[in-house]
Amino acid sequence: MVGVQITYLGHAAFCVETPRAIVITDPWLSPHGAFDSAWFQFPRNHHLAPFVREKLSESSKERFVYISHEHGDHFDQEFLNSVQNRDFTIVIPHFRRAALRAAFADYRPKALVSCVDRQEVAIPGGYLKLYLDNSGLNRDSAIIIRAEGQSFLDLNDCKLYDLLPSIAQDQGPFDVFTCQFSGATWHPTCYEYPRALYERISERKVLSKFETVARAIETITPRVFLPSAGPACFLDPMLIQLNFERVNIFPRAPKLLRYLDKRLPNSHTRCMEIMPGDVLDVESGQYVRQAEERVDEENFEPYIRSYAALYAGFFAERKTQCLGISTVLERLRAELYRKLSNLTLHERVHTPLYFALNDCSQQMVRVDFPKKKVEFVTQIHGSDYYSIRAPSWEVVRVLDGKLTWEEFALTFRMRLNREPDVYQTLVQGFLLMEAEDMNEFCVKLLDIEEQQKRTVVEAGGTRYAIDRSCPHQGGDLSRGWLEDARFWTCPRHRWQFDLQKGGQCTTSNASIRAVCLEND
Ligand code: FES
């Protein structure tokens, strides 16, 4: 072959092939989905597993597998273990947390390269370059693949949007760019909101994510943009209704493409919908082959129903009965106490957290952060609280070490509530992180708070001084933008800060300390 071809493997997975090298990114191909089979590949891509194994055995070319982060929809251990010929190099980000490196300890590839931020790895005719987001709550990375004079920027789920101007300047121009465009969190998916509010929050999140993608395309100005890295679909009878909601945070590519069409009328970037098995020639920006199976808005529901039917037996056999509920509650109490013991900033959280099990109505666990106490209670007291209720069998999976707390959150099999409806970073971190990461998470938060740098932004002709580091996870607010003439928006996860209310965040108790300079 001449030139560079990119085969889409579904979700965030690509096979980038040059005359001398093959790079496979985030191959999520095994038939059991991810996050305890809560998520499945959409459209399905399992038939491409033999193709990828064959590519990884292509001895005339140097081969690389890049894993962007630990999440199961990117790091598919079941599939990687199915590859017998391991004469290839694994490229991973070097996170402070050692779990990803440790997972490869016995894998025995030809080489394992654990890259620090901005490290380059030579490949025949070019290089790979990784950018790391290692900011506490998030661990993720993006990759540039440059070979034979062609370039591919794969941001996948990594939220380093504030770095894109400098990446474009230092590494551009790019031929092909891809990033995530749909949501992938438990908010508002698992929250007990009235339907209208749920849809309002979802729609706002969708549009703000689409806007982020549009801005990324404007910054990168690639020749081709490929929407990828989601949404997944949900085949578990407990979750299947998520696929068919009128509005949620899982929009499909056609909706994004309609948005981009209107939003970027003069763009020279070609935005293409891709299906697993499609092959793109990078130089011409044209498909050289297209997959036969294509899902569109018309056939979506029957497609999902028949996909789910394949798994009916699998889910029917799942063990969801849990014996010894009181033992589970006691183990949960001990685990939450272990987390609390490592949460050095516990005194700052004045909202108690209640953790209940679906199959136990008499007791729940209450976390009292300031008093550093975890106790059994029978009901929620007061009007200021966070609560979570989950199936005991899923909680046991975490307690047994089969799922991390973050993976547990992504199973979407729980319901949450918070009164008032305000995001609290420390409670969120407490729920999502492992006990051993709690302390480092607090250190990161303090680091962000201690950042003294300020920046000046403008809203309708008025200038405001604000903190430059976003209080959420340190995004560079000088790269943010104004919405509705008063809300300064962070480019990473799009928190909004009201400049007319001193920089107060609209959804959390954080602030960027906005000071109006016209009054000086
Ligand atoms: S870093 Fe997450 S919203 Fe700013």
Image (cartoon, helix red, strand yellow):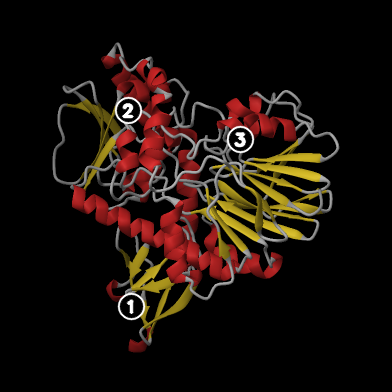
**N-term-proximal mark, 3 vs 2:** 3
Q: Is residue 322 above or below residue 260?
A: above
Q: Position of residue 514 (x, y in %)?
A: 36, 74
Q: Which residue is mark 3?
A: 100
Which amino acid is tagged 3? Leu
Name the residue located 14 percent from the left edge and 45 percent from the top edge.
383
The residue closer to the viewer here, 223 or 212, is 223
Q: Which residue is mark 1?
A: 485
Callout 2: 10 Å neighbours few (<14), some, many (20+)? Answer: few
Q: Is residue 135 above or below residue 491?
A: above
Q: Is residue 474 left or right of residue 348?
A: right
Which amino acid is tagged 1? Ala
Q: Is residue 234 above or below residue 470?
A: above
Image quarter where the C terminus lies is bottom left
**N-term-proximal mark, 3 vs 1:** 3
Q: Whole-Å distance between the Cαs marked 3 and 2?
A: 31 Å
Q: Is residue 177 left or right of residue 203?
A: right
Circle 2 SS class: loop
Which amino acid is tagged 2? Pro
Circle 1 SS class: loop
State whether residue 508 appears in this view. Answer: no
Q: Which residue is mark 2?
A: 237
Q: Position of residue 56 (x, y in %)?
A: 74, 34
